[in-house]
Amino acid sequence: MNRSQQIQQLKSTHHWDIIIIGGGATGLGAAVDAAARGYKTLLVEQYDFGKGTSSRSTKLIHGGVRYLQQGNIRLVRDALKERGLLLKNAPHLAHPLKLVMPSYRWYETLYYGLGLKIYNFLSGKLSLGKSEMLSIKRTQNYIKGLDGKRLSGGVAYYDGQFDDARLCITLALTAADVSATVLNYAKVTGLIRENEKVKGVVIHDTINNETYEARGTIVVNATGVFVDDVLKMDDDGLEKAVSPSQGIHIVVDKKFFPGEQALFIPRTDDGRVLFAVPFHDKVIIGTTDTSIDHPTIEPVPQEEEVEFVINHFNRYVHTGLQRSDVKSVFAGLRPLIKIPGQKKTAVLPRDHTIWESKGGMINISGGKWTTYRKMAQEVILKSHYAGGLAYTRCQTETMKLHGWIKKPDYDDPLHYYGSDAAAIRYLQHQGYSQTIHPNLHYTIAEVMWAVGNEMAITVEDVLSRRTRALILDAKAAIEAAPLVADIMMKEMNKDEAWKEQQLKDFYKVAEGYVLK
């Protein structure tokens, strides 16, 4: 996947069937679906693929136990099906994970145990394994440090775990594999109209400082929390459709949460859930639910959110976690669909919504990572009807994503690359096996691969999304940045001025990930 080739495809194509704005989970999924059906597809993203919400999740592919508790059976059933499909179609990126839910009242083990039996039943043939009720001792064996005085038992069950940013990049690669044109750092600055209908977009390439026009039958707005900004280009009289909600996570060393299982606390003080999830030899703990007035591309964790997560974790797991132990903290925004009169985002539905705006643009927002494929299928079907495109069946239920391998070795740090790992390993054998930092397992070869094959344009692209260095250990990522910038400068034939600007830009972003 080469950016220069993608730009050339943009320049040489006079008409697209579908133009997608937004390179997060929903937009990239839609690009894969549309191109796999044979539609001439263009996707443009104003920053990098997965720069926003799609790289800031809890790293779980799940049906949503809390949605079952709320009675949203349809969402749970759909999500469980999609969970199973993703684990089949991208086993190098997603795998089963055992979660343990401790109970602190005698009836909770039975209550949650029965609920998870239903949860497992709804997954049908795509079940990842049976749930089981646990004694106090077995619960403590799974989750070290649990308070045994109040504990009455627990329940263990399975969901899926994945690397969200790597899945974004894999979807971009998959879309390119099936002949979609995908461009990062391509900002839509306006809509093209014909007879009062939206028939294209004006694109500003922020890397080369060039402007292009792309015309097509249907334009899809899949910009997540920024959906209202694009919607205003079509109809500036509309009220906002999205109520953004911020969730933060902290990342700590595994000594504070040893073991291979995840912890799930079904209800915190604000009505949300708390997870502690093993990820890349670290542990991610979160999340919060804070209403935000205006979405930003780099949301900042609030002090009270950080304290909330640390205090709640320490309430259940007694390993003495302190602020100084936090390796990184990151925030993401959920694009929740508004309900008139409802201000508390924790109770807003996680379903997605698809609608056609004034000029015929198709808009999609809401939803969750787990259901990205189904959302894509539905928005492309809607686009087919709205644009009068020739009907072809959806191909993505059984479509293997880029890099698919049958049996990944999850102990191999390169397993997230799937079949591409062989090429990276070859680079390592050619003398590029040095790690970019003593506390990070990523190598020079992976930086070179990201630049040459995954459209990494900035130092942040490499350290935040092609690798996960920034969210795993922010200080180590900052210390690794000069070496990464130097490698990229040579691979991209840039000069020292470019390198210095890249470091300045990265340090500004990275500061937000360091807990002070």
Image (cartoon, rainbow, N blue to C red):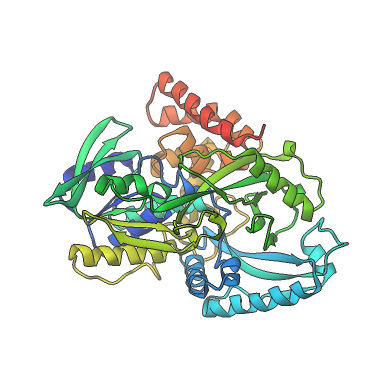
Along the line of sight, the residue nearer the viewer: 313 or 172: 313
Query: Image height check: is 255 above or below 151?
Result: above
Q: Is residue 206 left or right of residue 101?
A: left
Residue at the location (67% across, 75% down)? 131
Res 35 quadrant in image? bottom left
Q: Position of residue 150 (x, y in %)?
A: 85, 63
Res 305 quadrant in image? top right
In the displayed orientation, state which residue is furthest to the left. 195
Query: Image height check: is 455 above or below 75?
Result: above
Q: Position of residue 44 (x, y in %)?
A: 31, 46
Q: Is residue 15 left or right of residue 159?
A: left
Residue at the location (25% across, 48% down)? 234
Q: Position of residue 413 (x, y in %)?
A: 59, 50
Q: Is residue 3 left or right of residue 150?
A: left
Q: Is residue 63 left or right of residue 336?
A: right
Res 267 quadrant in image? bottom right
Q: Is residue 258 visible?
A: yes
Looking at the image, how many numbered discs can be counted on the residues?
Answer: 0
Residue at the location (42% across, 62% down)? 352
Q: Position of residue 118 (x, y in %)?
A: 61, 79
* Quadrant occupied by the C terminus: top right
Query: Image height check: is 137 above or below 469?
Result: below
